[in-house]
């Protein structure tokens, strides 16, 4: 992370310089992406001169938005320490955090033997999420052009169980690696989730809230075990 200054001398960039730069450009791209998201429905409404009824819009908005706000706040406090600054900016813009970006980033940092929250971990996480986004875009593009030919294969009954278990298989593989590094910490969230799902099976669809909840349980349990000298 060094560079040559105007005097031909080697200047050393500190982690603070790196994170400040990432924050600066991250905010620009985040606001740019937000503007594009808003621009699409706005331009459609302008072009067709078709505007939503404000009363009906706000009724629907108030009924749905608070749920997304709560999830967004929880994910912000949960995923940013895991993904780093650069990875978080890129991950939140491109989406699919739980089932794609977070596993890719964690696996990449584990393979590179770097820790989350460090400059090295932030770089590896950002690269992993960027590559994941590019690969996803290429696969979707390929699928759009080849949909006519691959649709019978994707809809084959023999593959239905595989598609239904992609997320458990993905997190199961990552779980083996992470749990083996600190199995004592993993006991509390696993037991908590098992009991919760047995009592309320319908919560299986609330992944966006339950994953951060499991993180909170793990942090609290780890803190208590640390104080008691079990870790």
Image (cartoon, helix red, strand yellow):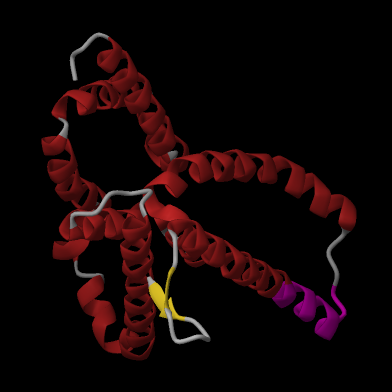
Q: Main secondary structure of the magenta part?
A: helix
Q: Is residue 194 above or below residue 102?
A: above
Q: Nearer the viewer, residue 19 or 183?
A: 19
Q: Quadrant of the N terminus?
A: bottom left
Q: Quadrant of the C terminus?
A: top left
What count of labels does the image hold?
0
Residue under the point 39% across and 79% down: 137
The quarter of the displayed image where residue 198 is located:
top left
Magenta span includes 40: yes
Residue range (magenta): 39-50
The quarter of the displayed image where residue 197 is located:
top left
Q: Is residue 50 visible?
A: yes
Residue under the point 88% across and 51% down: 55
Residue under the point 76% across and 43% down: 62
Q: Is residue 89 visible?
A: no
Q: Is residue 97 above or below residue 41?
A: above
The quarter of the displayed image where residue 91 is located:
bottom left
142 sits to left or right of 41: left
Q: Position of residue 131 (x, y in %)?
A: 33, 74
Q: Nearer the viewer, residue 21 or 145?
A: 21
| Name of the residue lying farthest toward the top | 228
| Name of the residue lying farthest toward the bottom | 145
Q: Position of residue 202 (x, y in %)?
A: 40, 32
Q: Is residue 13 above or below residue 114?
A: below
Magenta span includes 36: no
Q: Position of residue 2 (x, y in %)?
A: 39, 73
17 sits to left or right of 134: right
Residue under the point 47% across and 64% down: 18
């Amino acid at each position: 992370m060094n560079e040559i200054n105007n005097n031909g001398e080697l200047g050393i960039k500190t982690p603070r310089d790196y994170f400040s730069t990432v924050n600066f450009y991250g905010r620009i791209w985040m606001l740019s992406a937000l503007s594009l998201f808003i621009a699409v429905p706005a331009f459609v409404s302008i072009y067709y001169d078709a505007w939503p009824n404000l009363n009906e819009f706000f009724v629907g908005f108030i009924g749905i938005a608070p749920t997304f706000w709560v999830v967004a706040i929880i994910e912000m406090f949960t995923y940013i320490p895991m993904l780093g600054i650069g990875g978080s900016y890129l991950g939140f813009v491109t989406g699919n955090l739980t089932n794609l970006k977070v596993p890719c980033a964690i696996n990449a940092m584990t393979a590179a033997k770097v820790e989350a929250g460090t400059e090295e971990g932030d770089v590896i996480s950002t690269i992993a999420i960027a590559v994941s986004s590019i690969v996803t875009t290429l696969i979707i593009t390929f699928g759009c052009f080849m949909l006519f030919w691959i649709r019978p294969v994707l809809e084959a009954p023999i593959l239905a169980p595989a598609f239904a278990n992609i997320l458990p298989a993905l997190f199961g593989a990552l779980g083996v690696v992470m749990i083996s590094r600190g199995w004592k910490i993993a006991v509390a969230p696993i037991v908590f989730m098992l009991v919760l799902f047995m009592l309320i099976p319908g919560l299986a669809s609330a992944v966006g809230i339950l994953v951060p909840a499991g993180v909170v349980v793990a942090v609290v349990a780890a803190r208590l075990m640390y104080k008691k000298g079990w870790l």
